[in-house]
Amino acid sequence: MIRFFTSSTSFKWIIIVSMLLVFPLEASAFRQGSTASRTPSRSTASRTPSRSAASRTPSRSTASRTPSRSTASRTPSRSAASRTSSRSSASRTPSRVGSTGSRAPSRLDPEPTPVPTPVPTPPPTQAPSPTPSPSPTQAPAPTTPVITDSGVSDAPLEPVNLRVVVVAKDGSGDYNSIQTAVSNANPGDTIQVKNGVYNEGVVFTKNGTSTKPITLINYPGHSPVIDPGRGKYPSECCPSNGPLRVEFRAEWIIMEGFEIRYGWDGVKVFKPHNTIRNNWIHHNRYHGILVISTSDLFVEGNTIEYNGTDPDTCLRPNGTFSPKHCHGVYMSDHSCTGIYDITIRGNVISTHGGKGIQWSGYDIGVGQSNGCSSKMRNTLVENNIIENNSWGMSLYHNVQESVIRNNTFVLEKYPSTNDTSHTFVAIWGSTGNIFKNNIFYSTRGDVLGVQIKDNVSSQNAFDYNLWKVNSQSWVWKDSWRLDFTSNHRFITGWDGSGLCCNEDPGFYNASSGIYDLTAGSPARDRGLKNECAPTDFYKDIRSDSSCDIGMHEF
């Protein structure tokens, strides 16, 4: 070893060997970086769109069932956020912790670029003074969708807003009482009502005109309540305190956007040329909507439910509780002057101890001792959900030339009632009515398909309907039978092109009250074209060829 180090040649070799051993280690240190730090961080979560089951499922709350029910309230809630992948820029950018900024600089790194001199930030521009908010009474009239069709009626469709006044309980409007505003209205006026519970009946006594209807409507974004009984039925709170309901004793009126509860009836109509649209009418003592010997009405987009169902409501003259006599929509020719040209479209009519829809042309009215000789003609009933009433509908004498099409009847349960039988349709003394493109659905064993109560009522037409009925009981020409599935078509000559009698319509979710059709539904494209409603429950245009049966066009 001494001789090795004393040799100049050997000393040169030891230096060379040392350099070869040290430099690779240093170079290796500069290249070092884990695999994990060089791999882009894109987890499964960051690549999967955020679409929960809730965002894809149609929602039928009570509010959404409040008919038209605008398009927004009828459409399953799938916001842009729920349809868009939750992949932010941060989650898509590789996380490179082995970059220059994460390690100490070395002699192999380039010289840093000098930092530029910062430019001074200019002083902020002074914000302009805010414009004062306009008074509520100067608010623009609500934007109302143009509706071009009222079926067989000529009732008014749109407000004209010649003058807009506001009702507000807090005194911020032109009036604090709905009745005061209505009593002071002129043709063409629009009365907007702000939030609040208005403990008053409302009676229309001033007419609009065909070109200048008077409109009573909710203030934009508000949900006012008309509650004449102050949270109780009139018999409990104030039986002699005025007409405790909404009454139409005038013509050319539009009423829209209210909750109506705790009256004798929800709405009572004595005059023609009126529109009742997009209201929630519930828990009134007798009927939801009561029509007395008048015509030319447009009833659309309402939710009408639970009227005459509570104990001590729907009392007969002898004081007995009789819920079978209280209905969702009741058309009574009490004055024996006839009823005609009424359109009932796109409503949810639910949970009554009587009928969802009742016609009665046999009232013993003024000067009549054996019922009316007048007729109830030309009613159009389409795109309604008629569910869980004791009877779906009843045509009781003198009902003629009506069309009942593209409705969905469901009878899975019903409130307490003194009815001894339950059915989708019953007919007495009525002819020339058409029932087509409807769904009749029940899985119960006690629901009769149809009841035809006399010989003359066999002169109606049923076809292109879908029937899901578990009971064999039915009534034909006032005779009870037990062969609905096997003999209904043969005996009646009806529904030759229909689907009878145990066809599952393939609802989206019947147990949750969602009666939209699914892709595999047998009701799709099975309707009769010339009896198809032009749009469906949601106002979507139906097929140009054969429409779907029921209220929904898939």
Image (spheres, grey):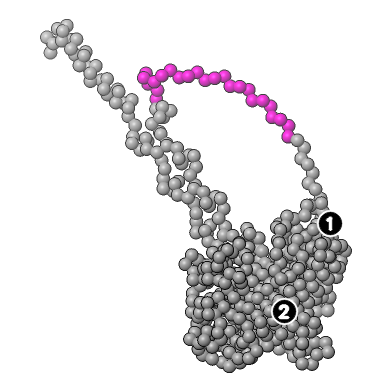
Does 125 appear in magenta?
Answer: yes
Task: Identify the residue at image location x=85%, y=70%.
Answer: 205
Callout 2: helix, strand or loop?
A: strand
**Label 2 sits on residue:** 377
Label 2 crowd (10 A; few <14 / some 14-19 / many >=20): many
Task: Identify the residue at image location x=65%, y=68%.
Answer: 346
Task: Identify the residue at image location x=78%, y=52%.
Answer: 140
* In front of the other: 127 or 286: 286
Label 1 crowd (10 A; few <14 / some 14-19 / many >=20): some
| Horizontal relation, residue 171 to residue 434: left or right | right
**Label 1 sits on residue:** 163
* In front of the other: 253 or 146: 146
Inter-mark Cα distance, 1 to 2: 36 Å
Callout 1: helix, strand or loop?
A: strand
Q: Position of residue 57 (x, y in %)?
A: 53, 61
Does 363 appear in magenta?
Answer: no
Q: Amino acid at mark 2?
A: Arg
| Horizontal relation, residue 372 to residue 497: left or right | right
Q: Amino acid at mark 1?
A: Arg
Which image quarter is the N terminus in?
top left
Magenta residues span: 104-127
Q: Position of residue 308 (x, y in %)?
A: 69, 79
Q: Quadrant of residue 223?
A: bottom right
Name the chief secondary structure element in magenta. loop
Q: Quadrant of residue 242?
A: bottom right
